Amino acid sequence: MSGFLPDHDDAEVRVSPNFGPRRDGKRADAIILHYTGMQTGEAAEAWLCNPESEVSSHYIVHEDGRIVQMVREADRAWHAGASSWHGETDMNSRSVGIEIVNPGHILGYEDFPDRQIEAVIGLCRGVALRQNVSPERVLAHSDIASARKADPGEKFPWYRLAASGIGHFVEPLPVREGRVLMQGSAGDAVEKLQSMLALYGYGVEISGVFDDVTRLAVTAFQRHFRPALVDSVADESTIETLHALLAKLVKNGV
C-alpha cells in the first residue's frame, strides 16, 4: 500500500507495512493505549514502520500533539501481542492501537505533556465515534497483557480522558490502613477478588489462591484505576475501587 486517506482529520499518514485483515469477521470495538518505550518519537515511528520489527500501531501521538496514522482503522495492526480481555485472545483484531510517545519505565518515565494528552483525547473521541467503542473498552496495554506490559503506566492521566467522556472511570478510593490480600493469600476473599477482576475483563483464574497471575492483574488494575500506590497488594482501596467500577457498569446497563 503506497498510501491512504487518514481516518482522523488531524492525522498525517506514514504507511507501515506491518498489518493485515482483521480475522474471522471481527471488528474493532476497543481502543488500546500504549507508550512507545523508546528514547525518541522519531525512533519509535521508524520502528513501527520497519518491516523487520513486525510491530505496528494504527496511530502514534508525539509529545507536541502531532498525530501520525500508520495503519487504516479497518485493518489489523500488530500492537497488542499476546493478550486477553474477556476471554478474547486476538485483541489485534478487536482494537485500534494508539502509541503515545514516552520513554517508559525503563528509559526514564516522564509525565505526559498537556498538548499530547489533548491530542490523545481528540483522537480517542474520533475513534470511539467511528468504531462505536463503549467507554469500558478504552484500555491500557497493561490491562490486556498484564504479565508483559506496564504501559501507558501510572502517570497516564486517565481521569483527564474521563472528564472528556473517554473511558470508564471512577474516582479511586483513598489509600488507607486495613486488611490486604497479597501473593500467598488464599480463601473466599481471594476468590471474590478474582471473580471481580475476571468479570471486569482481566485474564485471571478463579482459584481462591492469590497467585502470580492475580498479582500481575492487580498491578495492572492499580496502574490504570488506582495509580496513587502501585504495590501489587489488593488493599481496601483497590478492592473498593474495583467494586465501584463494576457497580457503575451495572448501573449503565453493561
Image (spheres, helix red, strand yellow):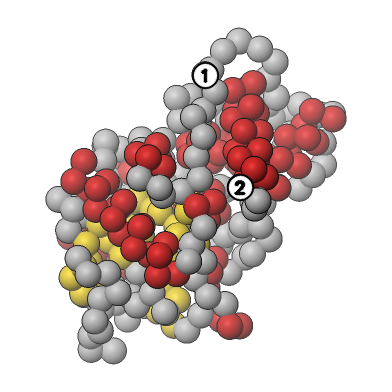
Q: Quadrant of the N terminus?
A: bottom left
**Element on which disc 2 rests:** loop
Residue at (50% x, 45% y) in the render = 168
**Which label number is shown at residue 174?**
1
Q: Position of residue 228 (x, y in %)?
A: 45, 25
- Amino acid identity at mark 1: Pro
- Disc marking residue 252: 2
x, y percentage for residue 55?
38, 69
Task: Looking at this view, name the residue that lies furthest to the bottom.
Answer: 1
Q: Residue furthest left?
A: 64
What secondary structure is marked by label 1? loop
Amino acid of disc 2? Asn
**Disc 1/disc 2 C-alpha distance (Å):** 24 Å
Q: Position of residue 7 (x, y in %)?
A: 30, 74
Choose between 90 and 130: the one closer to the eye. 130
In the rendered image, is residue 38 in sight?
Answer: no
**Would you call the spot at circle 2 few (<14 residues within 10 Å), some (14-19), or many (20 or more)?**
few
Picture residue at 76% right of the left edge, 42% below the top? 195
Residue 10 visible (yes or no):
yes
Taking the view exactly as shown, the residue that stands out farthest to the right is: 188
Image-quadrant location for residue 183: top right
